[in-house]
Image (tube, grey):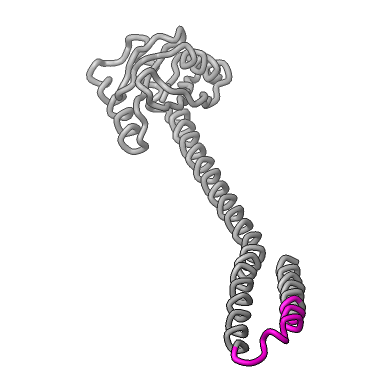
């Protein structure tokens, strides 16, 4: 549609320019006779060229501006979709990490023994090694182990401060027995963080899952 409008604009404008120049030439015909005719025709040519150049510029802008705008919009939409897909994929990976911890019966049993003071101190290193592997393999900044009251019992990593929102997230994970994701927040140091709370499930004598501790990553 824009191409058709541009072509029509060029045709109409060119026709008007031709009519005007032709009429002006006819009215000036007596003055153009004799020795001054070549000079007058040259002046007429310059006038025509001076009018055609801006006409071509306006036509080009009218024809190509809508196309450029559409291409820019399409590119921005494609970039936004790609970024959204990348974020969704990243969140799914982090949730899968948490679910893998929930399903780690051996690790959870050792953590439960540690919380209750029944774990051999030498075996605490096995828990810390698992936390370190999580940090190194998946780029977490820290792993915290909280007890049922929200107190820190074991940690690995850089950011070890426990905010009220972190304790609330841990409580949600213990109550729901599901991996919970917090909200993005900025620390006092200016770093952006996103917490994940992972419940430590232990089966009781009847085989029911109970929660006594929670990981926060």
Query: Image quadrant of residue 55?
Result: bottom right
201 left or right, relative to 18: left
Horizontally, residue 140 falls left or right of residue 210, namely left
Residue 12: which quarter of the image?
A: bottom right
Residue at 35% x, 25% y: name it: 142
Residue appearing at x 63%, y 77% in the figure: 48
Choose between 63 and 82: the one closer to the eye: 63
Q: Is residue 22 magenta?
A: yes
Where in the figure is residue 3, as x and y percent of width and height? 71, 70
Q: Residue 105's image quarter?
A: top left
Q: Is residue 204 visible?
A: no
Q: Residue at x 76, y 84 (%)?
A: 26
For the C terminus, the image quarter is top left
Residue 104: give x, y in percent of width and height: 42, 30
| Residues drawn in magenta | 20-35
Magenta region, main secondary structure: helix
Which residue lies at the image location 31% right of the left edge and 24% below the top edge? Answer: 127
Comparing 171 with 34, the one in front is: 34
Give the left or right position of residue 121, taking residue 70 as reference: left
């Amino acid at each position: 549609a824009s191409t058709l409008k541009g072509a029509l604009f060029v045709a109409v404008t060119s026709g008007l320019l031709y009519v005007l120049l032709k009429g002006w030439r006819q009215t000036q015909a007596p003055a153009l006779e004799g020795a001054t005719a070549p000079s007058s025709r040259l002046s007429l040519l310059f006038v025509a060229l001076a009018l055609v150049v801006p006409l071509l510029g306006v036509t080009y802008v009218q024809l190509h501006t809508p196309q450029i705008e559409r291409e820019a919009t399409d590119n921005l939409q494609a970039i936004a979709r790609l970024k959204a897909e990348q974020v969704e994929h990243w969140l799914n990976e982090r949730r899968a990490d948490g679910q893998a911890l929930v399903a780690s019966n051996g690790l959870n049993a050792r953590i439960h023994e540690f919380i209750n003071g029944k774990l051999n101190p030498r075996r605490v290193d096995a828990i810390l090694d698992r936390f370190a592997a999580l940090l190194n393999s998946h780029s977490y900044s820290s792993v915290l182990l909280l007890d049922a009251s929200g107190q820190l019992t074991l940690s690995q990593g850089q950011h070890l401060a426990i905010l009220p929102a972190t304790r609330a997230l841990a409580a949600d994970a213990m109550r729901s027995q599901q991996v919970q994701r917090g909200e993005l927040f900025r620390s006092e140091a200016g770093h952006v963080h996103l917490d994940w709370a992972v419940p430590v499930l232990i089966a009781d004598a009847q085989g029911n899952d109970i929660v006594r501790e929670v990981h926060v990553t």
